[in-house]
Amino acid sequence: MNKLILIGNGFDLAHGLKTKYNDFILWYFNNILKSLVERDEFSDQLFEISFSQGRVINFPNRADSITQFKELLEYYKDFLKYRFKCALFDILFKKTIEPNWVDIESEYYSYLKNLYIQLERHDFSNFENIEKQVKSLNNDFEFIKVKLQEYLSTVESTTKSQIPDITEHFRKHFSTVPNAQSSLMFLNFNYTSTIKIYLQELKHKQYKVNYIHGKLDDETNPIIFGYGDEIDSYYQKIENVNNNAFLKNFKSFGYLITYNYQDFSRFLDNDSFEVYILGHSCGLSDRTMLNKIVEHKNCRVIKIFYYERSSTENDYIEKIHELSRHFSPVNKGRMRDIIKPLSNSVPLVKCKANKKE
């Protein structure tokens, strides 16, 4: 039996890498503060700010959190002039509150869907205006994508070392395969290559790392940043608008740039397989792909390596709630058969309180 290992952002977070979208947004705003202090102003496609009454002495050039950045804007509101030039980024800023995560891809789709709803509500009489807004949204999203790559390139350079718990998982679950015909695929949803530091733990060569969403600084495998839920009830309506601007940032079209998706499909079709989830949130932004995996006739078992918040709290139930959305109604019974229960699951990394000294 083959093994399909889903590597998500939680895998990078376990290694101390600041790869949450919140981290990216904080980095962006700290660059704004630095520019404001050095040049008295800042302006780009998303945001602009300047001192309204001359330079403020000892104005902070960084914030430790987005909450602190918001507090700075409020505290110095009489001395600052600023505005969001991008409606999507304004939404992201308002929704970014520690410790909650903001999902840029999901917020993009929500915005796009709302534009479609406006179009439908007015019986398509305002098409030209909505089309203009969609194109503007796409341009802003592309700018955010470029800035995200710039940020992640700084994170990727951070020195990484193995984590004992994860090393143990690799040795126990992925080090060997049942027979010479069996193989492993690490389906890496991250743009980073943290997974590489564990490949030395594999005692065989029947494996492949598939950077399904692309790889940082790799022109042959550009990053795919967008939304991936073709099952949503509005997707078909959006597609039927017959305007390519509405479809520009759906992941399905990005998958056709490389052979990654075809390699993934062939792996699923080749033989029965087990699924291991390491740090993937299983959210709706990857719904089309996850539905293909969990409802595939060859899928036999799904094992979740959950996030352990404390010795008494974890996100296992949240994970299966997310996973349930990828099963169609007729397959809910099968879902309960193939997902291993909590009692048969383990944390990706044990919390310190549980670790043996």
Image (cartoon, rainbow, N blue to C red):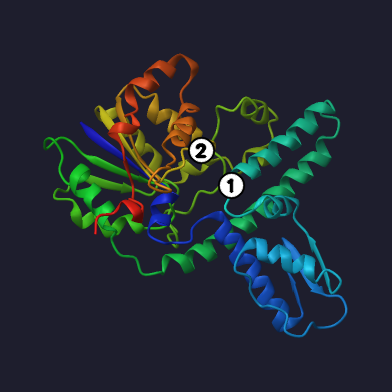
The Cα–Cα distance between marks 1 and 2, rounded to whole angstroms, is: 10 Å
Q: Earlier in the sequence, mark 1 or mark 2?
A: 1
The amino acid beneath tag 2 is Gly
Residue ID for mark 1:
103
Rendered location of residue 264, percent (x, y): 35, 38
Q: Quadrant of residue 182?
A: top left
**Image coords of residue 147 (percent x, y):** 59, 62
Q: Which residue is mark 2?
A: 283
Residue 213 point in image, percent of width and height = 45, 48
What residue lies at 66% left-to-right and 78% top-to-bottom? Answer: 61
SS at badge 1: loop
Check the image and name the residue furthest to the bottom: 57
Query: Residue most toward the top?
Result: 330
In the drawing, what numbered circle is on residue 122?
none
| Disc 2 packing (10 Å; few <14; some 14–19; many ≥20) | some
Q: Give the residue type at disc 1.
A: Asp
Instruction: Choose between 124 and 208: the one closer to the eye.
Output: 208
Q: Is residue 251 left or right of residue 183?
A: right
Compared to residue 149, the image places residue 38 above or below, namely below
The residue shown at (79%, 32%) is 119
Q: Quadrant of the C terminus?
A: bottom left
**Quarter occupied by residue 70:** bottom right
* Residue drawn at point x = 35 percent, y = 27 percent: 339
> Mark 2 and mark 1 in contact (Cβ < 8 Å)?
yes
Observer able to see residue 259: no
Element under label 2?
loop
Image quadrant containing the N terminus? top left
Could you say which is closer to the camera, residue 24 or residue 79?
Answer: 79
